[in-house]
Image: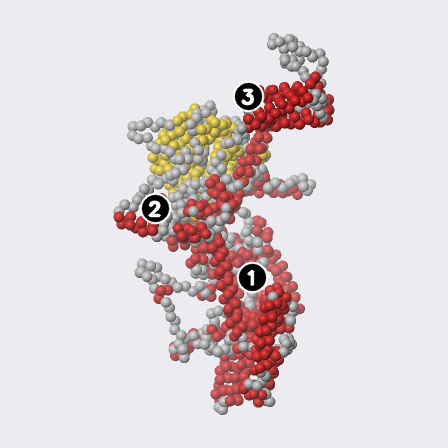
Amino acid sequence: MAKSKATRKSGETMKMTSSRETVVQGMDDEELQRALADDIISASEDEGGSDDERKHCKLLEAISSLGGKKRKKLTERSEASIQVSEFTVNAEGEGDKINLSDLIGTLDKTPSALIKTKKQLKNLQHNQSTLETPLTRKETEKIQREVAFEKTSKEVSRWQSVVLQNQKAEQLVFPLNQEPSGPKRIEQVVAGWKAQTPLEQEIFSLLRMNKQPLHDPVLTPTEEASLRAMSLEEAKIRRAELQKTRVLQSYYEAKAKRERKIKSKKYHRVQKKVMRKEYLKQFDEMVKTDPAAALEELKKMELSRMKERMSLKHQNSGKWAKSKAIMAKYDDGARKAMQIQLEVNKDLTQKLVIPADEDEEDEEESAETLPDFVNDVEPILDQVNPWMRGKLSTEPMMQEESNRLDPPVWPREVGKPGEGWDDQEEDEEQMEETEEESLLRGFEERRKLRQTEDVEVAPMSMEENDDEKKAEILDISDDDEEAVEISDDEEAVEISDDEEAGLSNFTSLFHGLVKNHMEPPADQPKASPGAGQEESPALLEEGLVRVRTLEDVELLSQDISASDTALLTTQTPGTEETDTQSATQQADKKRKRKKMIDPNEVLTKEAKVIEMPLAPTAIEDVEDKEEQRIIIKEAFAGDDVISDFLKDKRKQEEAGRPKVIDLTLPGWGEWGGLGLQPSRSKRKRFRVKVAPPPPRQDQKLPNIIIAEKRDSSIAAHQVCQLPFPFENPTQFERTIRSPVGHTWNTQNTVQKITAPKVVTQLGAIIEPIAREDLIKNNRQAVTRPSINLESDQGPQKKRCSQQKKKHKRKRN
Amino acid sequence: MKVKVLSRNPDDYVRETKLDIQRVPRNYDPSLHPFEVPREYTRALNATKLERVFAKPFLTSLDGHRDGVNCMAKHPKSLSTMLSGSCDGELKVWNLTKRECVRTLQAHEGFVRGVVVRFCGTSFFTVGDDKTIKQWKMETPSYGEEEEPLNTILGKSVFTSIDHHQKEGVFVTCGQQVDIWDEQRSNPIRSFSWGVDSFNCVRFNPVETELLASCASDRSIVLYDMREATPLKKVIMNMRSNTLCWNPMEAYNFTCSNEDYNLYTFDMRYLDKPVTVHMDHVSAVLDVDYSPTGKEFVSASFDKTIRIFPKDSGHSREVYHTKRMQHVISIKWSSDSKYILSASDEMNIRLWKANAAEKLGLLTPREKAAVNYSQKLKEKFQHHPQIRRISRHRHLPKSIYSQSKELRVMNEARRRKERNVRKHSKPGSMPVVTEKEKHVVTVVK
């Protein structure tokens, strides 16, 4: 096709050129150029073929003939040479030098571009510099090497992500490319199996009819279709969405329920007003957007107004209103109720007016809620023996105590969530602040407050209640003795609770002591950075001792404890000084801040009275209980924990106080002997008084003994320097504090926590990671994540992700 | 008065059959289980002690060679098969489960320098001091059949090492130059040489299978690509590297064992500085092999010890030695990552456990859980001095102990001197050279 076209075209040009030759002798340059361009096109179009070549030659001749008189006949090839060659090649223009520009002399008539090239050629000829010699073999090789290295390193760098992934993986299971467990296809297991017996055939026909899977026992076509329709990922997202909506729904339902249950009329009134305002706003908008609907709404409103005016339901004409009217003389409440009624009437009959009336909320609400104490263990009532008043858990008490000790703390804490809520509300509603809204918010806040400070408020209210109750009892009951008895009982409870609080102080204190022993102080690592540097980074401590039995191991550990104590004794003096100094400084500051606390004051302080309705969880045999109580009472008869503790503390203080050193030597300068004392003046002179040590850290803490000497037996077990990956001591302590074992965690958690990082299988050959893995990994990353069918493989078997994906691929 | 009675669903506490384990309802209230940290600490301490007591890594020694064992090879398909070549040219095939030699053949005259099993496991190649490469069948010849190599290639010079491609019928040898051979041809398909005339080790990369690395006697490590006409890059170190091993899980990392008692892990893309310097040996390191998991490697040294290093740690986690083990020449980590094989001068091959205290064999699920738990505890409390002391204590023969001490003193002195010089010279004139930078002389492009 192309060929024929080319021939046709060349024919045309031929014609053209011939016509030109005959008709117009002197031709324009422009036309010539066009002709040339035509030729070039045609030349490019024809591809190969001897026929074409011939034609091409013709064409060239035709072009050269265009030049007219300047045409040269070159029958022979001539070359510059001195000798006459044997092949009859002669050198015609031997003598004269050929200029480069002569070579393009034939193109003289062409435009200025050619002249330019001529000039350039001349310049080139004048230029004396020679071409560079090609690089040496060594250098070329170097370049080759560099290029090759670049290429390979780029290629190898593809593995970076995989390597990092494996490094970060929680668990690696080797060998990497394990066959997926689970059911296999029939064809995989048995080759060339066919249903032969009639029963089998029948079963298979049935299966086929019901579109049950014949080969793949995992999925039916419908299941597969559904899988194709929605990937697991999508399904998960969808489910999450559904869950969220459900949760939200239930939340709103609960909220609505809660709001419905609120008895405060004020609250509802305000709520209603807000609703109404909202409604008005909507209405305003509706007037703008949808006037017809607005008109309807307006009609509805009108209707309700008409109804009200007709029935006068709220105009104090009903039965209830009349009765209230009678009461109104004596009762403020009734009067108020009537007024409210009237207001409603006003609202309904007149145009909407936003009234501004804000009263304080009635306090009854907060009093109504029961404190959490109700569900606590029933305390044993024994005032004498402190052991009997012990509680297993002291946390709530401690909390309460801390609250009591520093009152400015809790309101701030409580205030925070409220503020957060504020912000949210503002964002959501974007309405201008009105009084009602703020009131509403107040309600919410107060409710939240109530939840958090249950512990705080409840006892108070109970107290109030009790007072009221007492008053009632005194008023109503005739026999005073009973009332007195009851109140006595209550007092007893009060006392016991008071002591309980004190005791909880002590339990917390002992907890603290234990913790002090167990955990190294947080600032310790900072105190001794020098020690850390000295420690060698060697992983192994190689020695000449061979450890064969447990006894040897014990010896090892003793060894280290000894060395550790030695280290400690050398270290301590310097650090101790600074410690004590800082301690004194701190103590001074504290003194400025608050006045001293007398230990006795604190110990005998009156705890808040906690009284509550006690719901008995179980009724035991009263006698049994009594008996047990007596036994325990006898067992711990003489125990007075508080005074014991005080004594202990005093003893410690005594021990810490420096003793006066008496250096008097009897018999020097006077008579000595049995029954003779050195003189007073001498004793005075030789008695050395040591400067008092810095005040103890627990001086102002009545219920704490701080051991200021470091216990070496414990120090041997303590970490004296922050280990590498941790950034601060609290981080490290947190990891240590969280237990791992099944005593503290559920089975699954333990399995998860204790899963080893690398799992290998005995007897399974682990192949090096294959290049296919990488390719697959990359491809997987590009395509969208497919379905994971491996959830049945056990939750704790996390394989590295790339390989997981591989399995997916296989299944699909 | 309403009486509240405890009521429980029997399903919660009654077992279905009497073979089941009794169900124990647990209360996870932390107040019922106080002192969790001290209790776990004690458990961790006990676990560490037991670990040390049960740490018995030596399993068996395979004797039968009549000269020092010079090289070993793993079988890629069978865990129980292992090959070893000795200095008298004898080659033995071992069955590790039976702990016996199943086949002996006189492979070469003089040393067997290298042995490698083809990737399919049907044949193996040996190179020796007699300038030949021989290919042998893996099967033992039947009765009456003569022990003959499948193929013999006569080379021009001595071959010092051989390695086989992971997937193709291509192998590489080194000697005066690095040659890549096609199994079907008697001439190398490609030869690399770069100004050196003796190489002592060449290894294929098991991941990027076309890459190679070799150690040369001019203290250099050279990288090659089988597809390229020229080598890629060369790094020259302070002292000669004896062998190298690629990480089977990380394509670009390899570790070389050096004459200067250290091992160096390199990233092949950045050769100017090793990633990690592994120290602890007190004499030249002769061989190194990676665990198939790529997390650890084992090294054999002239100081008669074997050490196991985590791949990114500067110091070893374990040292193995016995009284009778002499200079360890060759080392291999079994391909299920559970065992280590060492071949030494005194004609023995020894089988070790990779984890000294690990219980081998099947474990019941409860045992497994207990092991995992104690492992986790040890890890959690590893920084506590007592536990650290016990878990890190290793017995060393006196000679090695004193030698390492001496080395430490020398190093300390050197460091001190350097510090002093720096102190007394113009600031900036004595730049701080890190340990990693110290050992690399130059990178040749």
Q: Amino acid at mark 2?
A: Ile
Image mark 3: chain = A
Q: Are marks 1 and 3 on the same chain?
A: yes
Closer to the camera in the image, A631 or A104: A104
Q: Can residue A355 be seen here?
A: yes
Q: Amino acid at mark 1?
A: Lys
Distance between mark 1 and mark 3 Cα atoms? 113 Å
**Sooner in the amino-acid sequence: mark 3 or mark 2:** 3
**Sooner in the amino-acid sequence: mark 1 or mark 3:** 3
Vertical relation: A625 (above or below) B31:
below
Residue A269, percent from left and from top: 58, 76
Residue A326, percent from left and from top: 57, 89
The residue at the point 33 percent across, 32 percent down is: B140
Closer to the camera in the image, A271 or B390: A271
> Which of the 4 quarters of the picture holds residue B186?
top left
Do the residues bearing badges 2 and 1 touch, measured as CB atoms within 8 Å? Answer: no
The residue at the point 49 percent across, 91 percent down is: A478
SS class of the residue under badge 3? helix
Q: Amino acid at mark 3?
A: Asp
Image mark 2: chain = A
**Sooner in the amino-acid sequence: mark 2 or mark 1:** 2
SS class of the residue under badge 2? helix
Q: Are marks 3 and 2 on the same chain?
A: yes
Label ID, residue A51: 3
Residue A406, percent from left and from top: 60, 70
SS class of the residue under badge 1? loop
Question: Mark 2 — residue?
Answer: A186
The residue at the point 38 percent across, 70 percent down is: B7
The reply, left or right, for residue A18 in relation to residue B99 is right
Label ID, residue A709: 1
Distance between mark 2 and mark 1 Cα atoms? 76 Å
> Which of the 4 quarters of the picture holds residue A2?
top right
